[in-house]
Image (cartoon, rainbow, N blue to C red):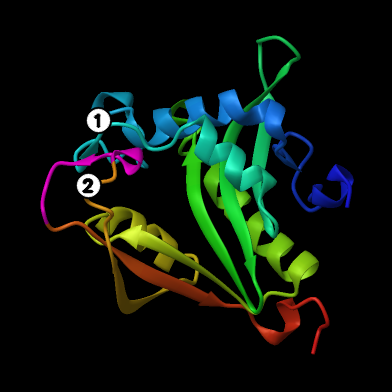
Amino acid sequence: MTDASLTAPSIPAAAPDFRIADLDDVPALVDLVESAYRGGPGAGGWTTEAHLIDGQRTDREQVSEIITAEGGLILVAEVESAGPGGRAIAASCQLEDRGATAYFGMFAVDPGSQGAGLGRALLARAESYAREEWGAERMEMTVIEQRADLIAWYERRGYRRTGEFEPFPYGDERFGLPRRPDLRFERLVKEFGAGERRDGA
């Protein structure tokens, strides 16, 4: 599979380019995720969890493990940049092949790029990839229950709350330092319609 297979022809030329991340992208991805999740309210980003969790969101080891894992990848969206190379990663997400279900996680959009539809475009591309490349019938994710604004954003894009919960990993500083004792994750699911699946059945 080539990076060309990730191009979304229906998106205008001015929109981001999508590709699968490799190990050279690890430092930039860690910076992006930390900025999006831990940037704090002053950063202006709607993905921040700084009011709920301190500490790190991820590190180079975790991101490297996702990139190299069997059946897993990180999808990135690149945009024009004034920096070296003229392109920069502005959004990313984790995808994992779990058979009929694809898992979507670690969704991050650069705070300075939020509000312009970049996150929506990346989510749509991730769903398309899961259907077309893996034949997934649904996408699932887990979102901190207290993130009502983020859950509502996913609901507007076809995800439903399941009422199924997973505990937050209290005591594991790799996932941050919780600022309250009642955090937990709720599972969200989106079923793909028959016309959206790879075989068209």
Q: Is residue 80 shown left or right of residue 31?
A: right
Q: Is residue 172 shown left or right of residue 198?
A: left
Quarter location, residue 192: bottom right
Kind of residue sitting beneath label 2: Gly
Q: Is residue 174 magenta?
A: yes
Q: Is residue 63 above or below residue 113?
A: below
Tag 1, which secondary structure? helix
Q: Is residue 84 magenta?
A: no
Q: Magenta residues? A: 173-181
Q: Residue at x 72, y 77 (%)?
A: 196
Residue 97 x/y as whole percent: 65, 66
Q: Is residue 98 above or below residue 86?
A: below
Residue 145 x/y as whole percent: 25, 62
Residue 124 x/y as whole percent: 63, 58
The residues tagged by marks 2 and 1 sit, at their Cα atoms, a distance apart of: 24 Å
* Mark 1 neighbour density, 10 Å: few (under 14) some (14–19) many (20 or more): few
Tag 2, which secondary structure? loop
Residue wearing tag 1 = 41
